[in-house]
């Protein structure tokens, strides 16, 4: 039985394109978060996506990128006790006056993504749907202020 989890049109296309969707029993998403960050230069900001995955696969998965909307973001990965921490970072350089929460940030709780990976010894690209990225607020302490 083939199960397809769909949170975007890209996930629906994956079965037709010859890529494989991971089953929940092999790779289990423990958490998926999205955090905004501010840079040291005015208007430089971005997002950090952190996904923690428990693997019961016999072969080692190699994660390549996180697809969110039309954007594929390269990832870095660390592993401890078969739990993979996958981190993707984006940056945007726009001069913005308001350092508060933007409308885009507030609606991001509804975002989902697709994590691309392949197994050792295989060239087949596989997809792990990330059904929901939870937005985590990055709180600035009173003694810290954004650079303006």
Image: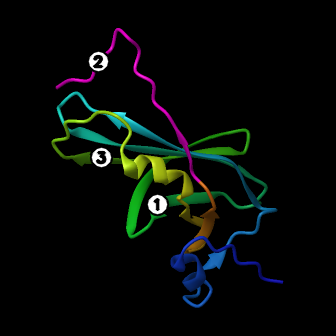
> What x and y, as percent, mark residue 123?
54, 75
Q: Is residue 59 above or below residue 48?
A: below
Q: Report whether 144 appears left or right of 2.
A: left
Disc 1 marks which residue? 65
Q: Which residues are magenta?
A: 133-148
Q: Is residue 94 above or below residue 5?
A: above
Q: Residue drawn at (20%, 23%), measured in percent from left and top?
A: 147
Q: Residue drawn at (53%, 79%), measured in percent from left and top?
A: 9
Closer to the eye: label 3 or 2:
2
Q: CA distance from mark 3 to mark 2?
A: 19 Å
- Label 1 vs 2, first from the N-terminus: 1
> What x and y, as percent, mark residue 90?
35, 49
> Which class describes the residues within 10 Å of circle 2: few (<14), some (14-19), or many (20+)?
few
Disc number placed over residue 91 in the picture, else none: 3
Q: Nearer the viewer, residue 55 or 39?
A: 39
Q: Nearer the viewer, residue 124 or 105?
A: 105
Q: Report whether 99 appears left or right of 19.
A: left
Look at the numbered disc 1 and give the secondary structure of its residue.
strand
> What x and y, as percent, mark residue 37?
37, 35
User: Is residue 88 shown to the viewer in this render?
Assistant: no
Q: CA distance from mark 1 to mark 2?
A: 32 Å
């Amino acid at each position: 039985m083939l199960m397809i989890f769909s949170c975007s049109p890209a996930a629906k296309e994956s079965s037709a394109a010859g890529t494989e969707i991971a089953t929940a029993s092999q790779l289990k998403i423990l958490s998926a978060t999205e955090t905004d960050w501010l840079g040291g230069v005015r208007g430089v900001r971005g997002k950090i996506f952190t996904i923690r995955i428990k693997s019961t696969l016999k072969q080692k998965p190699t994660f390549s990128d996180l697809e969110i909307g039309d954007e594929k973001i390269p990832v870095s990965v660390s592993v401890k006790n078969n739990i993979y921490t996958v981190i993707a970072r984006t940056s945007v350089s726009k001069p913005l006056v308001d350092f508060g929460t933007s409308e885009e940030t507030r609606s991001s709780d509804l975002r989902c993504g697709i994590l691309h990976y392949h197994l050792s010894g295989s060239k087949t690209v596989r997809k792990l749907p990330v059904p929901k990225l939870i937005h985590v607020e990055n709180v600035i302490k009173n003694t810290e202020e954004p650079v303006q």
